[in-house]
Amino acid sequence: MKEKMIEQTETFVKDKLKDDSSGHDWYHIYRVKKLALNIAEKEGADSFVCVMAALLHDIADEKIAGTEEEGLREVRNWLESIFVEEPYIKHILSIISSMSFKGGSGVEMESIEGKVVQDADRLDAIGAIGIGRTFAYSGAKGQLMYDPEIPVRETMTKEQYRNQKSTAINHFYEKLLKLKHGMNTPYAKKLANDRHAFLENFLEQFFEEWEGRK
């Protein structure tokens, strides 16, 4: 029964996100699901909750849904339509509503399943994939690759994070380089180390090329 629910949810999410070009497409969901399963196995978390929350987490994101409330309502309606039991629904919604970075102001996850899914989502935001997604998102939002005259924001509200002018490179300093220190589980922390180092090496090369030194 749970396998059927997962299959139905994969089809639902794939159809919803198939045309996204901001880095929140179906293949982002696919990778987060795979990472969540991998981490859940290592950390002893409930794989069904982890997979369902991973699959549905961007359906409720305001970048996709318009508002978080509308997105969470759509997730609940979907889960009810495939007859997921209410305790599972509450757990999945709790994870989804708490996992976003939101300018660094997200709340701490309470359950191991929440920690696993949040780690999986954050891992997909760093490393080689994270770099690609950053430039895809900036292009989709009409932001520049880099502008030395636009300062990195040290602190920001959720609204500033979403709407204030920034650049792809600034996003490394405003979010990506902070994610390694926000990992919850021991296994995700190990995976984050290599991905974080890749970000640092990329930035070093980027600025060498930006200044025409290489």
Image (spheres, rainbow, N blue to C red):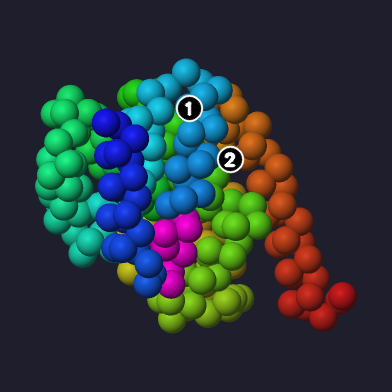
In the image, the segment drawn in magenta is 21-28
> Is 136 on the left-hand or right-hand side of 52?
right
Q: What residue type is labelled 2?
A: Lys
Q: Mark 1 points at which residue?
A: 40
Q: SS class of the residue under badge 2? A: helix
Gap between marks 1 and 2 measured at Cα? 18 Å
Q: What residue type is labelled 1?
A: Ala
> Is 3 on the left-hand or right-hand side of 169?
left
Closer-to-camera residue (94/149): 94
Residue at (40, 48) in percent of width and height: 101
Residue at (29, 47) in percent of width and height: 9
Q: Mark 2 points at which residue?
A: 180
- SS assignment for the magenta stretch, majority: loop
Above or below 32: residue 152: below
Residue 201: x percent and y percent? 76, 56
Rendering quarter of residue 91: top left
Q: Residues within 10 Å of mark 1 (few under 14, many from 20)?
A: many
Above or below 188: residue 99: below
Q: SS class of the residue under badge 1? A: helix
Which part of the image, by quadrant, shows the N terminus?
A: top left
Residue at (62, 39) in percent of width and height: 192
User: Magenta span has 22?
Assistant: yes
